[in-house]
Amino acid sequence: MASSKPSSEAIATASPSASILLVSPNNEILLLQRVKKSSSFASAHVFPGGHIDPDDGPLPSQDDVHIHEDNPAYRMGAIRECFEESGILLAKSREGSQHLLRLDEADRDSGRHAVHNKKVKFQDWVRSHGGEPDTGFLHPFTRWLTPSHIPRRFSTQMYLYFLPLAHPGIPQSLQIPTSDGGVEHTEAHFLPPAEWLSLAKADKIILFPPQFFLLSLVADFLKVPRADSAQAPRLEILQDQRNKLLDFIRTGDPSWEHKCISPSALRKEGKRLMMGLDEPGQELEGTGRRGDAERVIWVQFKGKEGTSGLEVAWRRDAQSDDIGDGGDASSNASEDEGLRQALRGPKENL
């Protein structure tokens, strides 16, 4: 029997989606820039990801709380979307190789377009080339559930995936992202997470709260090694950073693998909104699921111009009498739209 939780009032169904924080051989993070012709928040930078397709696999019913948990369909959808959007195929050879499946650029491009246009199922295409989607090396890294008062809602599973560290036997062309020709994105780049954050703080790129928050977390671990002869070899440093990040996401109560975050408005200060990250969402009330009670994120939603003033702060540093009392924490139409855009699958932004 499905494990369900009745709701006292009707809320919009949260559509299942998934995204990947893809880590390069140099411990950089991939972001894609959305097309300028997008109907709203054009040119924002996002992680590769999107809706879960029925061909990705079965999911629990919408009234089952387990639909908001890691599942093989979410993993398959995340890898498929990454391939469609960036051209990077996260698949291993069925012959047992630990390296990514090696296909030439022409094969990857033709498969990418065929999958995107639904001329072939992603899993069938990968297997026809002797591969298997590498779902086992995805590491769950929070789930984000759109607040219940927003009309269009999404339940997005975030993952980490580490591309292999540089090795003479790995063709680098397999790990170079490309745009999809302007269908959904115009650019695809790896940069250190700290650099992405700096660009957003300088208003040179648009990031939304989930992306900014997760980049802030990984920036504490994934850093460009210094050119210092006293340090350990570069590959050893990069691997140590990855190990420490994996240790981190397994900590906490609940761990970052299992946190579910449904942002809530706490208070305003000028044009900026302070958002709490501790609530799991209305569907998950009473289930024991929780988000992050230690941090908050500040943001100014600027309508079609995106966001500004993003900052992650410790919740304990906010004066307790300000939270819920110090200002009007209600959200307006622009903020609701900002939340909806921030928490839905990237493909839905078109």
Image: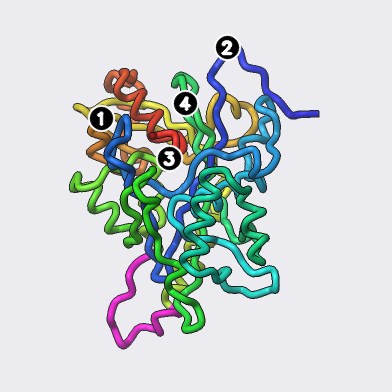
> Is most of the magenta stretch helix, strand or loop?
loop
State the image quarter where residue 69 is shown: top right
> Does 279 lie within the magenta span?
no
Which residue is identified by label 2?
9
Judge left or right: residue 220 versus residue 306: right
Contact, mark 4 vs mark 2 (Cβ under 8 Å): no
Give the magenta part as a residue range: 222-236
On residue 304, the disc is: 1
State the image quarter where residue 6 is shown: top right
Near-viewer residue (107 or 17): 107
> Within 10 angstroms of label 3, few (less than 14), some, or many (20 or more) residues?
many
C-alpha gap between disc 4 and disc 1: 20 Å
C-alpha gap between disc 3 and disc 2: 28 Å
> Within 10 angstroms of label 1, few (less than 14), some, or many (20 or more) residues?
few
Secondary structure category for the residue under label 3: helix
The nearer-to-camera label among 3 and 2 is: 3
> Within 10 angstroms of label 2, few (less than 14), some, or many (20 or more) residues?
few
Query: Earlier along the polypeptide chain: callout 4 or callout 3?
Result: 4
Q: Amino acid at mark 4?
A: Pro
C-alpha gap between disc 1 and disc 3: 16 Å
The nearer-to-camera label among 1 and 2 is: 1
